[in-house]
Amino acid sequence: MNASTAEILTIGDELLRGEIVDSNKAFLSERLLSLDIECHYQTSVRDDPADMIDAFRLAVTRSGVVLVSGGLGPTRDDLTAQVLADTFGRSLQLDEASLETIRSFFASVGREMSENNAKQAYFPDGADVLPNPIGTAPGFAIEEQGALIFCLPGVPRELCLMMDEQVLPRLASRSRGVDHVVRVTLLRTFGVGESSLDADLKDIAAGGDVSLGFRTSFPDNFLRPSARGATVEEAEAKLSELVAAIRDRLGAILYSEDDESMESVAGGLLRDRGKTISVAESCTGGLIAQKITDVAGSSEYFMGGIVAYSDAAKSGILGVEEALLSEHGAVSEPVVRAMAEGVRARFGTDFGVATTGISGPGGGSPEKPVGLVFVALASGDDATHVDSFVFPLDRARHRALTAQLALDWVRRRLAGLELVGPTLMRRSGGSSTPGGAA
């Protein structure tokens, strides 16, 4: 069996019904890649013994590593341990240490353990128990027909911790002595589409010991460069060289490495430079403020935000002149400029960001179509920068793209980069107006 190939099985009726998004497959695949173990198959099966047996039997015939997620809970539809034991002719055995750990877990939170929780302390004969430090469901590992099978709880928070603490070290110890290692990183870009990225990088990582993958997570596009070497040092050196080549080619649209979000990057620059920010939002409805405050420690630089959805709020709270609203309308360059400058003045911040637009699906006109948005960045000594775009998107993605653009402007201003708009999903809708009177 080839130990460098893997299969992921996620178990649960809720997955097949579409009731939840199966994020475990993506996480597990990513972690396996760090050990140069490629996931060749991913399968989801119902809480049905016959389906599970078929999946287990097939997996061990074609994969050296099998990761199973789900079915380790205390309820009647949690069948993984029993069905796996039945599939390979093993009995279930009580692990007294696991039972005591489960009892202690309930005692620590002031609850009495239900009898059905004892089910979680039974494992197939010969299994290696994998402790779960934050939940009641231990995992386990068995070896069958040359394949290593790891069973983990389906709760993502528990699965992620156990994968890192229990599974990866076991797999790493098995892989010692192989003739190569792989190093991988994640790069985030914003502003261009996936096909444009591929075209721009067509001659980079075209073969050999380096490779480059692409993934879209709107409104960003992710790059996954990887490098293979005989030693850790060699692989890391190749990866560093590859990342440098990508950075040189893409320039400012590459905004982070190691999966750091736009709000984290912009927030780090604000903190490092001792600057503060406030936001005035209309069409984005508080989304920019939410993204900023998703970052721990954002109170150091985020002073506050105002969701000024109505004309009355724009004039009464932000000080936008009613004459501007009457003459130009709420969705206009003069109004968004006044919003940014108004919120900056009211909070006394270094930067003020504002948005106003028509996210749809209704409310547009020939002069101001659905998708039109104005964004402004006021920064005191520098002239207020305003631009308008038409993003032909549904309401949720229109707001997401607008919020990301606003944060990208903050990043670019602090990094001394040109303030530009994204080319993805854009139609002509206005021109850049970085300065001048409203």
Image (cartoon, rainbow, N blue to C red):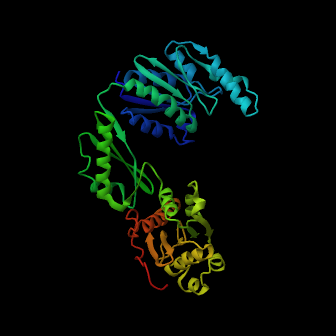
Residue 17, how many percent across, how many down?
Answer: 55, 39
How many marks do you count on the picture? Answer: 0
| Foreground pick, 25 / 222 | 222
| Foreground pick, 267 / 319 | 267
Which residue is painted at 39% across and 36% down in the image?
33
With respect to residue 271, does 98 lie above or below? above
- Residue 63 appears in the rendering: no
Drawn side of residue 49 relative to residue 103, left or right:
left
Which residue is painted at 49% across and 66% down in the image?
406
Could you say which quadrant of the image residue 176 lies in? top left
Residue 54, how many percent across, how many down?
Answer: 47, 22
Drawn side of residue 103 relative to residue 1, left or right:
right
Residue 155, how many percent across, how many down?
Answer: 58, 36
Could you say which quadrant of the image residue 199 lies in? bottom left
| Foreground pick, 168 / 401 | 168
Which residue is painted at 35% across and 39% down in the image?
183
With respect to residue 218, does 328 lie above or below? below
With respect to residue 173, does 370 lie above or below? below
Quarter of the rendering occupied by the N terminus: top left
Residue 297, how many percent across, how many down?
Answer: 58, 56
Drawn side of residue 59 relative to residue 89, left or right:
left
Which residue is painted at 25% across and 52% down in the image?
202
- Residue 221 appears in the rendering: yes
